[in-house]
Image (spheres, helix red, strand yellow):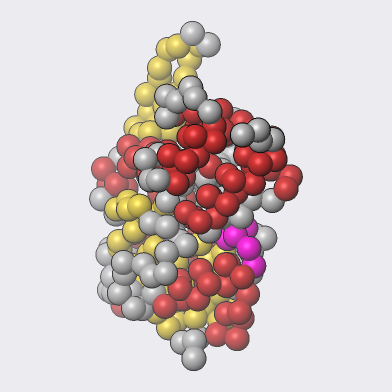
Amino acid sequence: MAYTNLDVHERVKTILYRLTGITLTDNKDIMISNRIDKLKRNCSYSGDIMNLLDLVEEGKYETDFINTFTTNKTHFFREDFHFVDLKDRVLPEFAQNGEKIDIWCSASSTGEEPYSIAMTIFEAMKETNTNISAKIIATDIDTNVLQYAANGIYRFSKASKEFPSWIKPQRYFKRRVKQNLSGEEVLIKANDELKRLLTFHELNLNDNSYPFAQNQFDVIFCRNVLIYFSVEDQNKILRRLFQYLKIGGTLYLGHSENPQDLINYVQRVGQNIFIKEKEIV
């Protein structure tokens, strides 16, 4: 049976939405074509793409499909004002009270965000001259990026402006120079001190519930991931997230995201920084 590229693209969008809730817009056709080729390579599949999509729907290549079509754009201290707020407003209270802080990074990608959170905690300990007991749970739907994050090894350039002035990367990473055909490559590896704060788990934000306790977290980072969902599904995810955030807890959203239907249950205290004031009724 003959089919067009449009037929393939529409089927990819349908499968992706069913598996993840992610909505691909019409301007993503080039990206979809490129990632179809990548999917075939990842699956070592040389046959007809519609047959491969049949196998995905049967569950055979489901993980490969999800890992191929999810987007993982990130860097250390992205939107660094959130980490400044965490360091200067949130963490000193926990340092003063001696309470443990539980943080959930709900779209950790390749790990730069949760490692940035961990570095921020250590900087706050230095500034307050106290110990802060902290646990960071980092989740993502893509199993490949979770493994990358758990390894904690990243390319580094001195010209990079990822790290703010109040962070010295050498405190938290071991540096290694690697020679390759294109010249010298500098790699940095997260030290064990950072890694001890972090646990990585696979999680689909589109699931009806998450494997956490009600009001478990003091802080939730959910940044630059809601933009991949429809407004209706953004609301569903935000309402689910909210169940696991304590009253008085902080929710950080990405620069182009907003709390949607939660607006009457939160207090805005900064740029896309919200404190939970009451439960949804």
In front here: 281 or 182?
281
**Location of residue 191 by image quarter:** top left
For the N terminus, the quadrant is: top right
- In the rendering, at what x and y percent does residue 277 appear? 50, 86
Counting every numbered tag in the picture gives: 0
Along the horizontal axis of the image, is 143 left or right of 70? Answer: left
Furthest residue toward bottom: 281
> Can see residue 242?
yes
Residue at x 51% of width, y 62% of height: 222
In front here: 53 or 167?
53
> Can see residue 219?
no
Along the horizontal axis of the image, is 165 left or right of 101? Answer: right
Along the horizontal axis of the image, is 256 left or right of 16? Answer: right
**Location of residue 122 by image quarter:** bottom left
Residue at x 36% of width, y 78% of height: 215
Q: Is 229 included in the stretch rendered in magenta?
A: yes
In front here: 192 or 109?
109
Residue at x 61% of width, y 79% of height: 261
**Magenta range:** 224-231
Q: Is 103 included in the stretch rendered in magenta?
A: no
- In the rendering, at what x and y percent does residue 151 appear? 32, 37
Furthest residue toward top: 181
Furthest residue toward right: 27
- In the rendering, at what x and y percent does residue 235 appear? 57, 72
Residue at x 34% of width, y 59% of height: 136
In front here: 28 or 214?
28
Say above or below: 10 vs 218: above
- In the rendering, at what x and y percent does residue 53 appear? 50, 39
